[in-house]
Amino acid sequence: HTVPDISLNDGNTIPQLGFGVYQIEPKDTAEAVRRALEIGYRHIDTAQMYGNEAEVGEAVRASGLDRGEVFVTSKLNNGFHRPEDARRAFESTLSALKMDHVDLFLIHWPLPTRYDGDFVSTWKTLEEFQRDGRARSIGVSNFQVPHLERLAAEADVVPAVNQIEVHPYLTNEQVRAYGSEHNILTEAWSPIAQGRVLDDPTIVDVAEQVGRTPAQVVLRWHVQRGDIVFPKSTTPKRIEENFRIFDFTLDDTAMERLSGLDRGESGRTGPNPDEFD
Ligand code: NAD
């Protein structure tokens, strides 16, 4: 019942289930991450934007685990896409974490018009971080198919992951399909739509049938689709609940019932990446 490791296109591996720390106050972050590591999570998803990288690093060190046992992701903040800004920002991530490398570093948003929409030069800067070993893997977040196509045409390294909004109300199939065709793993952010899908009657019904909670059923749906997830919670009971998803399965009917809840664009909880700048 342990968390599977998934292979990335660069030969590294990533635990399929992690712990997300978006909107966790810096003062609460070390305790939440400590809990998560105690329960067995070995993958933490943070970002420069979240303002809590230092506390993530603190909790990893305090856990007594070897650095190599915990997979740490961070993301380049918006407004730092110019290569010289990206280099400085990346150094600030490593110094906040007090680590000599991150396991995965992402461009957080494509930002279609800011800095002339030139995320390709930003991406080539992330390629430098990977070459010098300070980012073991590199990837993108909130990239739509045309953004991925542009990287494929103009850059050398294929992103290891694309971290996008995915949950039963926004199944995001086209972006996921591009990823699976091009060996880019999908990471599903806001996997339970920040709680919004949990009282959906179909999800509640499936949860009753399998004797699990709605959150466990939705997270299980993601992992059976092959995506990576990192639900966020500061409540110890929920942090534990969200970890217990590898000792049951959903049958095809249940999987299809959840996928059938897709609402397309109107199902988004966050901004549309084509418009967010
Ligand atoms: P989420 O879908 O993980 O939902 C979290 C919320 O759901 C919690 O605040 C809590 O209110 C509720 N919840 C959690 N577990 C529950 C349970 N077992 N039962 C009932 N309610 C529960 O939302 P999220 O935090 O937005 O997304 C997860 C992670 O994804 C983030 O922490 C972050 O790491 C990442 N993320 C990335 C981006 C991006 O642009 N790349 C954007 C948003 C989130």
Image (spheres, helix red, strand yellow):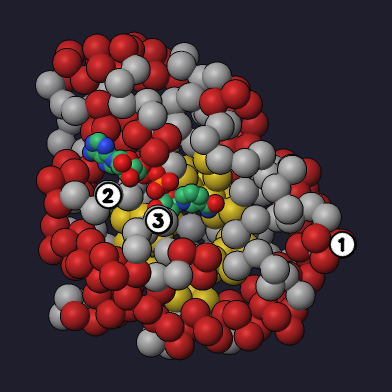
Residue 270 shows up from this direction: yes
- Among numbered discs 1 and 3, the one appearing first in the sequence: 3
At x 24%, y 75%, the residue is 59
Disc 1 marks which amino acid? Answer: Asp
**Residue picked out by circle 2:** 233
Q: Residues within 10 Å of mark 2 (few under 14, many from 20)?
A: many
Q: Secondary structure at mark 2?
A: loop
Residue 68 shows up from this direction: no
- Residue 78 lies, in percent from the top left, at 65, 64
- Among numbered discs 3 and 2, the one appearing first in the sequence: 3
Disc 3 marks which amino acid? Answer: Gln
- Among numbered discs 2 and 1, the one appearing first in the sequence: 1
At x 52%, y 76%, the residue is 135
Q: Residues within 10 Å of mark 1 (few under 14, many from 20)?
A: few
Q: Quadrant of the N terminus?
A: top left
**Does the beta carbon at disc 3 come under 8 Å from ligand 1?**
yes
**Does the beta carbon at disc 2 come under 8 Å from ligand 1?**
yes
Disc 2 marks which amino acid? Answer: Ser
In this view, 119 is above or below 3: below
Residue 127, image quadrant = bottom right
Please state if 78 lies on the left or on the right of 30 as rendered.
Answer: right
At x 27%, y 49%, the residue is 233
Q: Nearer the viewer, residue 54 or 191?
A: 54
Q: Secondary structure at mark 3?
A: loop
Q: Residues within 10 Å of mark 3 (few under 14, many from 20)?
A: some
Closer to viewer: mark 1 or mark 3 = 3
- Residue 41 lies, in percent from the top left, at 23, 58
**Residue picked out by circle 1:** 116
